[in-house]
Image (cartoon, rainbow, N blue to C red):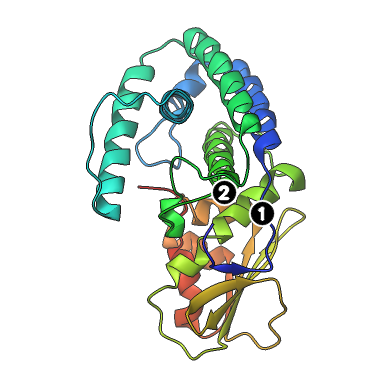
Amino acid sequence: MNTAATGLEPIHSAQLIRRVDDKLMELLSALEPHEWDLPTVAGQWKVRDVAAHLLDTAMRKLSMARDHCFVESVEIRSHEDVVKLVNRLNAEGVAVYRRLSPAVLIDAMRSACEQSARFHESLDPFAPAMFPVSWAGEETSTNWFDTARELTERWHHQQQIRLATSRPGIMTPELYHPVLDCFARGLPHTFRTFQAEEGTGVCLNISGECGGEWRLVKGASGWLLTAKPILNPAAEVMLPQEIAWRVFTKGIGRQELLRQSALGGRRDLAETIFQLTAVVA
């Protein structure tokens, strides 16, 4: 990871991907036939589309990162090129795998999840990852950060299905806090163009047993996440853990967000936190 954090520990989440995917298998196996066509907060995607996306991305990651299989040459010159490519691949994968019956999709998902878990568990967490975490502004990333990003993907898409089908969430400190911690690592990149005096501090507080406080300070060379307390932050945002994941994955409308959050201090600084998008889309 780059130098946008001082005093923050790496997020070791390789063992958690298996646990999140185990819960995914339980969830999908329990769905009633009509629930596969319920709408979700993921744009136009229904439950079957989100499930198809989870299968596609697991298989795609194994093919490229583990097996080094690339069937097309793509030139990436900008972040916009990354977004365009990812959106195309996602759409293509969903278009194919949404056609599978639940039984076939679940069987394929079981195999993909097991292979994915073994792959991430085998990685040296501090070796360079094949793909950088672009939404955090990185051009190169270590495996621990890429794996944490993978955890956020597996967790939040499963949560979309749970929300759509009125199933209990998986908001346990062990599984959800690392997701929020990973999301927060994108804050320095989100604030990169915000001009402020050196020493200006911003705090993000997420309530609930899975939440915590993330502190951002303007340094001489840019914005940094810090483990040190900020005594008089210029701005502060308070979010309940129930909606925090939706804020950073484009899953909540502005009016609902403002109704359920609380902002203190400079509003322009506080609302910049809401611009953090921890997905490539």
Question: Helix, strand or loop at disc 2?
Answer: helix
| Picture quadrant of residue 14 | top right
Q: Is residue 176 left or right of residue 83?
A: right
Q: Relative to 30, is 10 above or below?
A: below
Mark 1 surroundings within 10 Å by alpha-carbon count, few (fewer than 14), some (14 through 19), many (20 or more): some
Residue 135: where, in percent of width, then height? Answer: 43, 55
**Residue type beneath disc 1:** Pro
The front one of 17 and 122 is 122
Look at mark 1 in the image and give the residue it sits on: 10
Look at 53% across and 44% down and name the residue there: 146
Image check: 118 left or right of 249? right
Q: Mark 2 vs mark 1: which is more N-terminal?
A: 1
Q: Position of residue 138 (x, y in %)?
A: 44, 57
Above or below, 222 against 95 in this view is: below
Q: Which residue is mark 2?
A: 145
Residue that lies at the very extreme toward the bottom in this rendered image: 197
The percent position of residue 228, horizontal first and vertical second, equals 71, 76
- Amino acid, disc 2: Phe
Could you tell me which secondary element the residue under label 1 belongs to?
Answer: loop
Q: Are marks 2 and 1 in contact (CB under 8 Å)?
A: yes
